[in-house]
Amino acid sequence: MRSFKKIILQVLGIVLILTAANLVMNYALVPYSYVRVMMHQIAVEEYDTIFLGTSHGLNGISPNVVEEHTGRNCMNLCMGGEYPRDAYYFLKQVCKKSVPKRVVYELDAGYWCTQEGQRGDFNRIYYEMPWSFVKLEYTAAKMLELDFRATLFPWFYYRGQMGKVKEIIACKQSEDYKKYGIAAFQSPAQGYRDWFMQNTPVFQTKPEEKLELWTEENKNEDSFRYFEKLAGFCRDKDIELVVIVTPVPEKTLEKHQKKYQELDTYFSSYLEEQGVVFINYNLPERKIKNFDYSLEAFSDYEGHMNADQAAMFSVQLAEDLNQI
């Protein structure tokens, strides 16, 4: 009996040591993320309009500008790596505080024809989400299905940060971190301010990297399934749902005109079936007056806008939302 108790105590001791080591690794390797700021905001503030989507929305939509022109309190919850599955649970987390009147989903078709990858942004929303029934549901729906390591060992995705441990710890010990500040997210190239990522103009040659363009043959069925869950959730909660595609540079449209036309044809039909308003800002009839479509107004060929263009686009977006 004593031997059995000794074994149990040893096992418990090992579990406690491993748990403590895991917590230390998370603290030392997982950097401060603007998603933590987002989670804090939706826990303390009520919003009429929520923006969900990808990095195009994060860079291209100024919630303050839209708010100014619509009179509705707005929050941008777009981020790189946010698939429809993530957006669905992000919205459910928002609704724990209050139910918005409108959700604007920024659609990047690349997220609808690629699989959810094991990258640093794979579990950012999950990691920053406080424990609740929503997080438990999210755990079963994504983490346990795609990669359980994200649940047990979040630091695993940031193991390449070993050289920045001192910097990460110093940041987390700062007053800015404790007060959900944004000082850590400022750099000469971009800064997270006014609830969206503001890019500064880049004047050097921009490499034309491979774009993830819409391909029906590579449909990610999970993306469609979770978007339909999101649309159904909005209907049940009486939330107006609008889907948009943000502008891309003229050079990109010219080179990949066929792919962008296929995108519009497919999603126009699909979203009509879903009963969802669809606004594609890459159609000729949606051209924005005085908007700069040259590559100089974007950070890349993919369509991440500079801050000034984002403000101009947000004015047009607000006007269109007012007309729905």
Image (cartoon, rainbow, N blue to C red):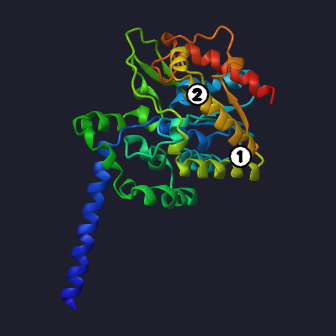
Q: Specify the quadrant that holds the C terminus.
A: top right
Side (left or right) of 146 relative to 231: left
First of labels 1, 2 by sequence position: 1
The residue mark sitting in front, 1 or 2, is 2
Residue 62 is drawn in which quadrant? top right
Which residue type carries mark 1? Val
Residue at the limit of the structure toward the bottom, as seen here: 1
Examine the rendered structure and indicate whether residue 275 appears above or below residue 132: above
Q: Secondary structure at mark 2?
A: helix
The residue nearer to you, when weighing 293 against 185, is: 293
Q: Position of residue 283 (x, y in %)?
A: 66, 22
Q: Residues within 10 Å of mark 2 (few under 14, many from 20)?
A: some
Q: CA distance from mark 1 to mark 2?
A: 34 Å
**Label disc, if present, on residue 125 of the rendered structure:** none
Q: Nearer the viewer, residue 198 or 260?
A: 260
Q: Position of residue 104 (x, y in %)?
A: 67, 35
In terms of depth relative to the viewer, which is nearer, 125 or 323?
323
* Residue in the image at 58% along x and 50% along y: 89
- At mark 1, the secondary structure is loop
Looking at the image, residue 225 lies above or below residue 251: below
Three-letter amino acid code at the position of disc 2: Tyr
Residue beneath disc 2: 260
Horizontal arrangement in the rendering, residue 258 relative to residue 7 (left or right): right
Residue at image point 74% right, 30% down: 72
